[in-house]
Amino acid sequence: MENLEKNLDVSLEIALAIHDLGFPETFFSDAGRAVRKGEIGYFPNMLVAGQSGTGKTSIIRDWAQKNEINLVPFYVPTYAAYAREEQKTVVLSYLQTEGFKEALSKSRSVLFLEHYEDMTAEIESALAELMDEHVLPSGDDKIFMPELLFVIAEETTGRNKD
């Protein structure tokens, strides 16, 4: 966890550059590879993994507060508790609520997926466009969320799932 804040700062710097450049068609990754808009990896999403009790969530929240980030929580276990055949529908319905859209429309927003280890294929499918392209479903349309800088997926490792 010692480098977590530094890694968050790097992702923020990249995301702000992409944002300030007006979401260019192509962006160069840290590895020097050209990443095109719409490709996975265009936005600097992060996976933060670690044992329970190591302070992942508190470090992320403190970092967000210090950097004036609008941290938008999405608690994955809430949706994983639904029957698998209902999960995608429930998540898509939530993503279309005015409250969620408003939260992501605020300046310097970062989506925080808590307990990513509980993510099912159905939930991931519902969130894929939001995570990869920063678009929300809206009826038959899609809405680009320009204030969403990146996504942090927090995963607790070594947890016994019963």
Image: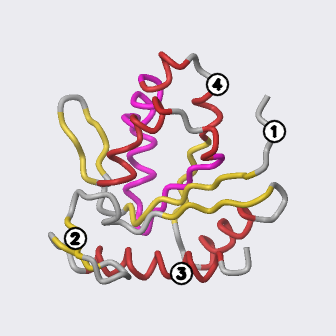
Vertical relation: 50 (above or below) 62: above
Earlier sequence position, callout 1 versus callout 4: 4
> Residue 140 at what x, y percent from top left?
18, 30
Query: Which amino acid lies under the numbered mark 2 shown in the image of this protein?
Result: Phe
Disc 1 to disc 4, C-alpha distance: 16 Å
Residue 36 x %, y %: 20, 66
Q: Which residue is mark 2?
A: 23
Q: CA distance from mark 2 to mark 4?
A: 36 Å
Residue assigned mark 4: 81
> Disc 2 vs disc 1: which is toward the camera?
1
Q: CA distance from mark 4 to mark 3?
A: 33 Å
Q: If you read the primary sequence from the N terminus, does the residue marked by circle 2 or circle 1 appear first? A: 2
- Look at the image and give the residue range highlighted in magenta: 89-115
Q: From the viewer's perspective, is 91 left or right of 154?
A: left
The relative height of residue 90 versus residue 105 in the rendered view (above or below) is: above
Query: Residue at coordinates 72% horizontally, 52% vertically from top-left?
Result: 156
Q: Nearer the viewer, residue 113 or 2?
A: 2
Rendered-image quadrant of the C terminus:
top right
Which secondary structure lies at badge 3? Answer: helix
**How far is disc 2 from disc 1 in space, using C-alphas?**
41 Å
